[in-house]
Amino acid sequence: MGVSRSIALYAVALAAASPASAATRNVDVRPFLDDTAEVTNVLDAFDADDPFDFKFSLGYATRLKSAKIRRESELKQPGLTQGRFIATNENVASYAQTTHTLNILAEAGLWKDLALRVKLPIVLSDTRDLTSLEGSAKNPERYAQGDGAPLFSLPFSSPSRSGLDWLGFELAWGITNQRRSPALPTWLAALEVQLPIGESLHACNARASIACRNVFFNESDTASQRDTGRTPGLNRGMTTLIVRSAVSKRYGDVEPYGQFSLLADFPTAGTDYASQRTQTGVILDRPPVIGTVLSGLEITASEEREHGRRLVVDVQGKASYISPGRDYSELFDALGSSGASSLAKPNAGAFEDNGTGGSRPVPSAGNVYFTGITDIAPHIALGGRLAVRWQAGPFVSFGLGAGLQWVQSHAITGGDECNTMVKGSVGEAANCRTVSGTTVKATGTPNPNYRPSIDAPGRRFLVDDTLITDLWANLSLLF
């Protein structure tokens, strides 16, 4: 709603309040508060009574994430089936992450029910810690590699990260609008692109002498393992695409709404993530795709149309599905900064026949280094939120809210050793082969991202009891 519309409506309201206009007091004056639900509201421009709209919002948000890290245990004892027993109840660590963010949003109307939004989150601080879970620090074998050497130590702290994360551009279009056509619901479609800014994430250990070690070191050159100026970074090194569609319709003082969105990440060249995607045997080479469905109800608790004031309570629930993919997990820093031989030593990018029926690395395929990014199993997340929005006048509004989200237990390591969808010669197969008498058959191609110390059954890590709490406040100015 622009300044021109607001001035006109004020004039109508004042005229209706004057004694000379007493006969018109019962006229249904168009209210200041003709916006739809927040999820479907979009600024516009070039209306007859409102040539241009612009909104600026400043918000502060805090996210608190807690989880329990567990690990499968492998016991080799006589009497057990094949001498092996697998359980998934070994406590490893408690995970805690706290993020404080300043959110900046600018929105401008481009045409009737068409707007451009520019979003810029500034991360004030992002801290992540691993601590002992029910005495797990006294049992380091729970987070050790096969020879007993620890993969990381407890307590573990990541460096505090801050700075610019990404810059987003969203084009929002109100396909139908209840204000213009009362018989129709408000239907919004939006497309958003988020571009990474600054340095991408690097696995780091705040307690180590070299916080962000060079993971791409040459084993024959010990000097290259020293500090090379790598910083913790902040953004995930992804160009993110989000499409969403939302519908709402107001009935008196209530306005139900629903929305579906789909988020897909595309790794940016030159990042640690991109370095793991080019080899033939790679199975998961993209981040998870996230689909989210939400439904809610906006309740108008108080409304003074003649003064442009309204108090709205927003109750919302949502469910998300996170597909399998390769991503930054709760153990990203701890595993990625590890000096354990099973993780620090690079894998061969590909193999070839060595001339005697065996396999050897292909020099031109290069090495694949472990950067802390791991295969994430599919899972769901369920959450809800409660928000209050106070429209103090035609040009100013305040918002407060809180949200809680539960994430299903899922594996955060556990890649497959062989890519069975790609089969070549026996020499190219390396360990991905079967032997029957004198017959040797390739069953797949080695996955260069596979690390037995964290991916093999009995050694996989899982995240459990994950809770995410969001708290936020914002101020919006409309011009």
Image (spheres, rainbow, N blue to C red):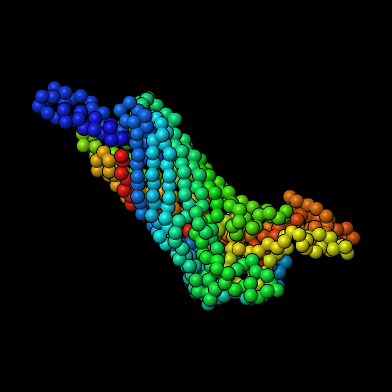
Q: Specify whether residue 112 is in view.
A: yes
Q: Is residue 28 left or right of residue 235?
A: left
Residue at the extreme right: 438
Q: Determine whether 395 is above or below 218 in the image.
A: above
State the residue at coordinates (37%, 32%): 45
State the residue at coordinates (38%, 50%): 104
Picture coordinates of residue 259, whole percent (x, y):
45, 39
State the residue at coordinates (85%, 63%): 354
Q: Quadrant of residue 313?
A: top left
Q: Is residue 283 left or right of residue 102?
A: right
Q: Quadrant of residue 73?
A: bottom right
Q: Determine whether 324 is above or below 155 in the image.
A: above
- 225 or 327: nearer the viewer: 225
Tell me how many marks there are: 0
Q: Quadrant of residue 310?
A: top left
Q: Determine whether 416 is above or below 477 in the image.
A: below
Picture coordinates of residue 212, whole percent (x, y):
55, 69
- 216 or 361: nearer the viewer: 216
Picture coordinates of residue 144, whole percent (x, y):
61, 72
Residue at the extreme left: 19
State the residue at coordinates (18%, 25%): 26
Q: Quadrant of the N terminus?
A: top left
- 130 or 42: nearer the viewer: 42
Q: Quadrant of the C terminus?
A: top left
- 42 or 90: nearer the viewer: 42
Q: Specify whether residue 256 is in view.
A: no
Picture coordinates of residue 303, whole percent (x, y):
24, 37
